[in-house]
Amino acid sequence: MVKSKAWNWDIALAPQWEEPASEVYPLLNRWQKQNFKKLLDLGCGVGRHALFFSKYGFEVSACDLSKEGIDKLVILAKESGLSITTKVCDMLSLPYEDNSFDCLIAYHAIYHSDDEGIKKVIDEIKRILKDGGEAYITFNTKYGSSFKDPKNKHLTDNTLVKTEGHEAGIPHYFANKQDVELLLRDFEIIEFSYKEEYWEDYVGTHYFVLIKKLDK
């Protein structure tokens, strides 16, 4: 298995990573209606979603492999007067008890792994969610620029390691719809959508999936 490697948020920070993604607004409404309280922002980066949900009264925990990202989140939370519990950790072995969270968001996070690693983190998500809890997860698809870029080093049919930019050396897992459905076979899939994002030098394509942990 490829060793996990963190983003360096001292060089990766850009405006889009500071504002909540549009997809989290309906999640806020949905999870408030379900009286969910305890939320984990998994792979939080500098904490844009942790800060967002904390502002609206959720009891938020946030974790990331990057100490730089967590340090920035701690400063932002303090400046905003928000209480967020933070941890620097590897998503493949999360430092939380079983059945700890009502809901979880992992936005552009868990695919920073390989074929074996992504299975481990999904098992961890299942472990720490309460029965009936929900998670919102994004996956890389094989339709975007990165998967087709010959400069990147392919390790398997689904995993490559980027060779340039702030993600150099970081593994990325790419999936098709059937791969995602297989990975999430122990959950109920509530929503499944596909989105393309166009940037100056590449096209990013992702699946956005809302899942529910089945009651025992």
Image: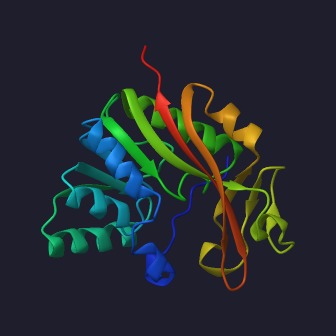
At a point 68% along the width and 34% down the height, the residue shown is 181
86 with respect to 170 (left or right):
left
89 with respect to 7 (left or right):
left
Q: Position of residue 156 (x, y in %)?
A: 82, 50
At a point 55% along the width and 51% down the height, the residue shown is 110
51 with respect to 3 (left or right):
left
Q: Is residue 164 above or below residue 71?
A: below
The chosen color scheme is rainbow
At a point 33% along the width and 42% down the height, the residue shown is 31
174 with respect to 170 (left or right):
right
Kindly give the residue lying farthest to the right in the view shown: 150
Residue 135 occupies quadrant: top left
Q: Is residue 22 above or below residue 118?
A: below
Q: Is residue 184 above or below residue 16?
A: above
Residue 140 occupies quadrant: bottom right
Residue toward you, 77 or 195: 195
Number of disc labels: 0
Q: Position of residue 97 (x, y in %)?
A: 31, 32
Quarter containing the C terminus: top left
Residue toward you, 3 or 68: 68
Residue 88 occupies quadrant: bottom left
Residue 15 in view here: yes
Residue 64 in view here: no
Kindly give the residue lying farthest to the left in the view shown: 81
Q: Position of residue 122 (x, y in %)?
A: 54, 37
Q: Position of residue 180 (x, y in %)?
A: 68, 40
Q: Is residue 133 above or below residue 112?
A: above
Residue toward you, 9 or 142: 142
At a point 79% along the width and 63% down the height, the residue shown is 147
